[in-house]
Image: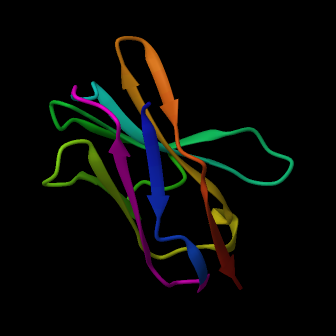
Amino acid sequence: QVQLVESGGGLVQAGGSLRLSCAASGITFNFHAMGWFRQAPGKQRELVALITSGERSDYGDSVKGRFTISSGSAKNTMYLQMNSLKPEDTAIYYCNALWNGIQYWGQGTQVTVSS
């Protein structure tokens, strides 16, 4: 059974930084792409960043220049470095992975940015 496990969320003051991690288990293949989504209360889930197996990355407009997505040295691991955090970045952050048209999701990790 494929599992994605996030870690690294927490409470931080505005202007601070956090680093999220995502690690997959229960798989023998490489994902075609991995990414981070987030969902704030009362809002739709939105793309934060993604990275493909070819190391191409893309970002949501609201985080460009502040967040950086990267692949880990271990297979199917991923990180999200979040700098210059703003209160509007407060949300549950979900790890997402794609393989052969199938999407996998982590359980989410809470990020709270205080003003």
- Quick one: which residue is furthest to the right in this view? 42
Q: Position of residue 65 (x, y in %)?
A: 37, 60
Q: Nearer the viewer, residue 88 or 76?
A: 76
Q: Residue, x 30% and y 51% (percent of image)? A: 78
Q: Is residue 60 above or below residue 113?
A: above
Q: Residue, x 67% and y 74% (percent of image)? A: 112
Q: Nearer the viewer, residue 60 or 113?
A: 113
Is 48 placed left or right of 90 in the picture?
A: left
* Figure quadrant of the C terminus: bottom right
* Figure quadrant of the N terminus: top left
Q: Is residue 40 above or below residue 27?
A: below
Q: Residue, x 52% and y 84% (percent of image)? A: 15
Q: Which residues are magenta?
A: 12-29
Q: Position of residue 50 (x, y in %)?
A: 37, 39
Q: Position of residue 14 (x, y in %)?
A: 60, 83
Q: Is residue 8 above or below residue 54?
A: below
Q: Nearer the viewer, residue 28 or 38?
A: 28
Is 99 placed left or right of 104 in the picture?
A: left
Q: Check residue 110 for magenta coloring.
A: no
